[in-house]
Image (cartoon, rainbow, N blue to C red):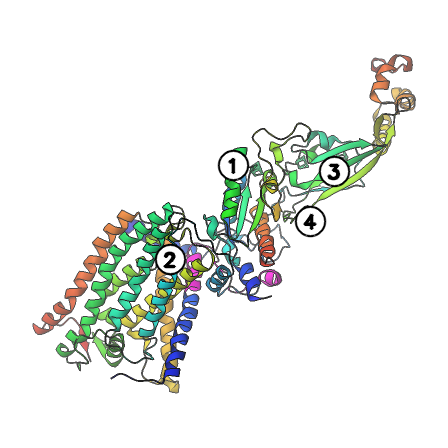
Amino acid sequence: MAVYLPIWQIIIICFALPAVGFFLGVLFQSLIRKLTARFQGRRGPWYIVPKSLRPVVGSTRILQPFWDIMKLMYKQTLIPSTAQRKIFISAPFAASTSLIIAIWFIPIIGISPFGPFEFSLIITLYLMLIVPLTIVASGAASSSPWGAIGSYREVILTLAYEIPFILGIFSTAMLTGILTPVYGGVPLIPGSLSLTDIVNFQASHSISFFGFKIPAFFILLNPFAAAAILMSLIGKLKIKPMDIPDAEVEVIAGAYTEYTGKLLGVYEIAKILLLFISLTLFIDMYLGGALVTVNYLGVPSFIWSGIVFGVEIVILILIISVVNAANARFRIDQAFTWYMKIPLILSLIGLVWPYIMVSLAGAGVSIGINIV
Amino acid sequence: MVKGKIKLLKEALESSKSIQTLDYPGGDPQIDYSKPRFGSGAKYSHICEGLRGVPQYSEEDCCGCAACESVCTANTIKTEDVNGKRIFTIDLGRCVFCGRCEEECPEDAIKLTSRFELAYTGPDSQNLEKVKFERDLILCERCGNPVAPVKQYEIYSEKVVKNLGEKWREQSKEDIEKAGKLCRECRRRNAYTLNLHTRKYY
Amino acid sequence: MGLKQKARLYSPWVFHAHCSGCNGCGIEIAAALNPRYDPERIGVTLHNNPRHADIMLVEGIVAKQHVPFLKRTYDQMPTPKAVVAIGSCAITGGVFKPDDDKGPSYTQGGPVDRIIPVDVYVPGCPPKPEAIIDGVIKAAIILSKRE
Ligand code: SF4
Ligand code: SF4
Ligand code: SF4
């Protein structure tokens, strides 16, 4: 049931959505920096600059990542004479463009302006996979030894985290199809690959968990896959134990070593969009997409959705920041083995977990979960 | 490994409670020495009482003896005797804040302050502490070479007379009048005729 | 203040060039970047890549063998850029150049401002971390006024 919008609305949405995503991503990045600093016993970017310093350095640094990007945009751009010019210049733009397109398919607080896409999950997956590919290409094209090492590490890390990520995502997508008929719920769509359907499923069902009635968050129905995906996201976002490809003390800046000025700024935009997309994807898939359908206390439901979205984001960012602050960087072989050990096994368990639940329910064993 | 990770997580959560960062570029620069300035109680900055900051010259007290020049580690203080004047040049860019000049100055005219915000933006900058001052010199009565700054001469002739015992006071007054305004070379050369040999004091 | 000036003032990324000093200043720079003084409060982050940096912190007397490398590193930074000379070594030669009459130490390639243009000088041997942060803020202000 596709919704056809007038062309001017489509164009406005095309530009407005990435802008909103970028703004929220900047806020998330700033919060990650602040919280990481807190966990390291520092202050992090000043949110309120002391009065005596305001004439000199401005009044707030909430948008610190934005200022970083703006500064890079006003800098000179150097391109090494030995670099493969075409790939070197186009790679950052390819990364940002693919992420901008990915934002169009992801429902934010349950709103997907272009209507429910049938295969939005697959589209998003592949668009997110373009980013590591461009990083690999740009590192190789920059003709710098550090870039080459960075690309090589990026390849290995991508291989490592992409397998549990995809397995986890598909095991979650299966939940919508498998679980509903067994536990007496209303089947929505058999095994949908549409993010909108996944969000709607979680919003329209609830679980009675040992007598408590809670929304049907997939993180409760399939915690193994959720854990595997969170671990993969840490690799995707280059959070501390997994920031091996651009480890600043080992390989200068990895694939970004030769990037300067505007091109680096475009890469930073891609990083921020990736952060936004990853967190929103996780919320859409496991935390009910932050969708509230009831007007509690007479307040419109979308405001409630916004509040829930904020709370869930803060919790996720808190986890990410603690991990970022408390861990030392892995070696690339350690990271690979770790991904092959823990997240892969978790995601495999997550893949068979729906079937286990089905067979348990078929055998009459109660595990305390009922979908209503 | 799991144990170690849990320990690290605990540490991260604990350190989020006690922020170690000082208030330095913002905050209140008025330092209260009664409050603790180390550990998590530190507020503005690590400014201790013994901090060796930029040397401060008091031109009034300085007698121009150039003792500071002779001990200065990095040749921050330079003197030059030209046309009956001793010109002091102090180039802050060279100072290593060792405090030797403060130690040696007989008049306490040079003191290390606790001021540390010294960054300057160029040779013409306002912040640059390039002190330059002059002292008048006494010229030798016979050959015209510089002897000592006027102020040092006055202070020390007084001090010598005051500190000597009754027995030699008159004698030394006479000596100062006779040979005080002669340069070192002339004094040595004419020591015999002036009857200045130090042995007579013993 | 325009967007350009604001952006430059708000995110000075620094790069530490160690040019044959005694490492005293290097340790103080490291101290200035640690949680105790946390310059990330005002947006300063350390990048060990001159291509990403806006401000170069130079320390040391710059030995003769070091001169071409310092020049090259400076050229690798994209404009606009600023240089902060840290310590009396970098400003004048300090204790390694004891007497002007006898000339500098035979290894000395000259104070930093004879090799590359310096914007801010931070005297001290070594300067306090606070003094370094002060110098970086002054350099950021200079940077924001560049074309
Ligand atoms: S030692 Fe003291 S009195 Fe003598 S010249 Fe130096 S500052 Fe002046
Ligand atoms: S502190 Fe040391 S280096 Fe500085 S002026 Fe005094 S003696 Fe010279
Ligand atoms: S200024 Fe002093 S501390 Fe700094 S490098 Fe030179 S000698 Fe070492």
> Which mark, by number, is residue B127?
4
Q: Does the CB distance between marks 2 and 4 fall below 8 Å?
A: no
Q: Which amino acid does label 3 sit on?
A: Thr
Label total for image = 4
The answer for how far apart the CA atoms under marks 2 and 4 are is: 49 Å
Q: Pinpoint residue A59: horizontal percent, then vertical percent.
A: 56, 65
Q: Name the residue under label 3.
A: B89
Q: Quadrant of ligand 2?
A: top right
Q: What residue type is labelled 1?
A: His
Q: Pinpoint residue B5: horizontal percent, then vertical percent.
A: 31, 52
Q: Does the CB distance between marks 3 and 1 fall below 8 Å?
A: no
Q: Which residue is drawn at 49% across and 63% down?
A: A70
Q: Which amino acid does label 2 sit on?
A: Lys
Task: Return the chain for callout 1.
Answer: C
Q: Name the residue under label 1.
A: C66
Discs 2 and 3 share one subunit: no
Q: Name the residue under label 2.
A: A86
The answer for how far apart the CA atoms under marks 4 and 1 are is: 30 Å
The answer for how far apart the CA atoms under marks 2 and 1 are is: 35 Å
Does the segment drawn in magenta span residue A156?
Answer: no
Query: Dot 3 surroundings within 10 Å: few (below 14), some, or many (20 or more)?
Result: some
Closest to the camera, between mark 2 and mark 1, is 2
Query: Dot 1 surroundings within 10 Å: few (below 14), some, or many (20 or more)?
Result: some
Q: Which of C121 and C111 is in front in this view?
A: C111
Quarter of the rendering occupied by the N terminus of chain A: bottom left
Specify start and end residues of the magenta stretch as a single range: A29-57
The answer for how far apart the CA atoms under marks 3 and 1 are is: 31 Å
Discs 3 and 4 share one subunit: yes
Dot 3: what SS? Answer: strand
Q: Pinpoint residue A168: horizontal percent, then vertical percent.
A: 22, 64
